[in-house]
Amino acid sequence: MTTTPTVLFICQHNAGRSQLGAALLDHLAGDRFTATSAGLSPADEVNPAVAATVAELGVDISANVPRAVTPADLEEADVVVLMKPGLTLPSTPRGEVLEWSFPNPEAWDTDAVRPLREAVAARIQSTLVAR
């Protein structure tokens, strides 16, 4: 029996980049992976511009609640994707660690987030889905 690999996307606030990564992996890879996300200091809500750009793809993340990454998350993940290099994690991940460098869309509008969405989707496609 093969288990589905878990991919954990992490950014600072779990409001933009990591939410975007998890939503796009779900969208692009379907049930080939289990996508989760977390942050180091969670925001109160998902970035509305990020939610709007994935809604354009038919994916609704508007009700997601940002959460803090835990040592258990890091132990369970087969792949940990840091959406910003150099993040200090609460423990050492068990799985493979990928460090990607994407800008924080915290104050961006939807038009500004679309190119980020496309860049993250391309990286997911070439790095994870193509495996």
Image: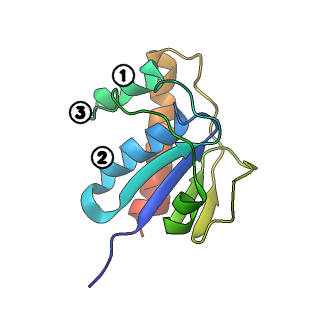
Compared across the picture, whether 93 is left or right of 37 comes to right
Among numbered discs 3 and 1, the one appearing first in the sequence: 1
Secondary structure of residue under mark 3: loop
Residue 91 location (% of width, % of height): 69, 61
Secondary structure of residue under mark 2: helix
Is 84 or 114 nearer to us in this picture?
84
Say which mark, if any, is on residue 32: none
Q: Which residue is mark 1?
A: 52
Q: Is residue 123 above or below residue 43?
A: below
Look at 44% across and 26% down and name the residue there. 50
Q: Which residue is mark 3?
A: 58
Q: Which residue is mark 2?
A: 27
Is 116 or 72 nearer to us in this picture?
72
Look at 27% across and 35% down and name the residue there. 59
Cα–Cα span, label 3 and label 2: 9 Å
Among numbered discs 3 and 2, the one appearing first in the sequence: 2
Does the CB distance between marks 3 and 2 fall below 8 Å? yes
Residue 80 location (% of width, % of height): 56, 59
Compared across the picture, whether 49 is left or right of 105 comes to left
Amino acid at dot 1: Ala
Residue 40 location (% of width, % of height): 64, 41
Q: Residues within 10 Å of mark 2 (few under 14, many from 20)?
A: some
